[in-house]
Image (cartoon, rainbow, N blue to C red):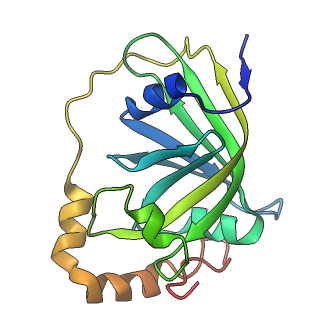
């Protein structure tokens, strides 16, 4: 039977910090809109407080999470134990896109390593924290992080990345407004 937590305590924060991957799920309001679920990795997730988390959002092929958050703010983050004892943790909440012109950007960005592909910080006010058994999650051996996205962003440079975001991240697959460098 799963447990619901009042807040993210030090023990839970330490467990989260030890995971190599997490999943982000969002959905548009439209019933025929596409639900999005994205895997994330690297040193890109932080527990800010007992009810506040954030992750470093990298430039990618789409901007579904950003578009959904701009429309309705609903988000869930899921961590699974692929090593050690089975466990799943979910953080449900209201998310915000914190771009580099946002008043909190510098404060939040300092908590993450510099990354050439950082597009924004996704900030979540966590409303529900729960766990479940994770018995069905396979055991997997972590080898190392991939550096492909980092190398890709570094090779593009700031100007080409800005153009890429304009061309590929401005709208979601459902046509919702996506990444906006001035928002």
Relative to 46, is 161 on the left or the right? left
x then y, percent, for residue 10: 51, 27
Which is nearer the eye, 143 or 50?
A: 50
Which is nearer the eye, 29 or 3?
A: 3
80 over 59 or under it: above or below:
above
Relative to 56, is 114 on the left or the right? left
x then y, percent, for residue 181: 49, 85
x then y, percent, for residue 99: 51, 76
- Residue at 36 percent across and 68 percent down: it is 118
Q: Quadrant of residue 115?
A: bottom left
Relative to 75, is 116 on the left or the right? left
52 over 144 or under it: above or below:
below
x then y, percent, for residue 150: 23, 61
Which is nearer the eye, 50 or 152?
A: 50
Position of the C terminus, as image quadrant, is bottom right
Which is nearer the eye, 63 or 55?
A: 55
102 over 54 or under it: above or below:
below
- Residue at 56 percent across and 17 percent down: it is 134
Relative to 62, is 123 on the left or the right? right
Position of the N terminus, as image quadrant, is top right
- Residue at 64 percent across and 65 percent down: it is 96
Q: Quadrant of residue 166?
A: bottom left
175 over 117 or under it: above or below:
below
Numbered disc total: 0
- Residue at 46 percent across and 78 percent down: it is 100
Q: Quadrant of residue 133?
A: top right
């Amino acid at each position: 039977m799963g447990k619901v937590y009042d807040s993210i305590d030090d023990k839970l924060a330490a467990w989260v910090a030890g995971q190599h991957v997490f999943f982000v799920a969002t959905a548009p309001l439209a019933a025929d809109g596409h639900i999005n679920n994205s895997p994330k990795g690297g040193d890109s997730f932080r527990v800010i407080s007992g009810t506040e988390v954030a992750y470093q959002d990298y430039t990618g092929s789409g901007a579904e999470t950003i578009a959904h958050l701009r429309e309705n703010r609903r988000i869930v983050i899921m961590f699974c134990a692929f090593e050690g004892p089975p466990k799943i943790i979910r953080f449900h909440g209201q998310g915000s896109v914190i771009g580099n012109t946002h008043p909190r950007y510098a404060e939040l960005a300092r908590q993450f390593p510099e990354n050439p592909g950082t597009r924004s910080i996704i900030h979540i006010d966590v409303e529900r924290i729960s766990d479940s058994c994770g018995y069905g999650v396979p055991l997997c051996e972590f080898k190392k992080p991939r550096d492909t996205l980092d190398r890709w962003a570094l090779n593009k440079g700031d100007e080409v990345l800005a153009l890429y975001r304009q061309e590929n991240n401005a709208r979601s697959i459902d046509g919702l407004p996506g990444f906006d460098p001035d928002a």
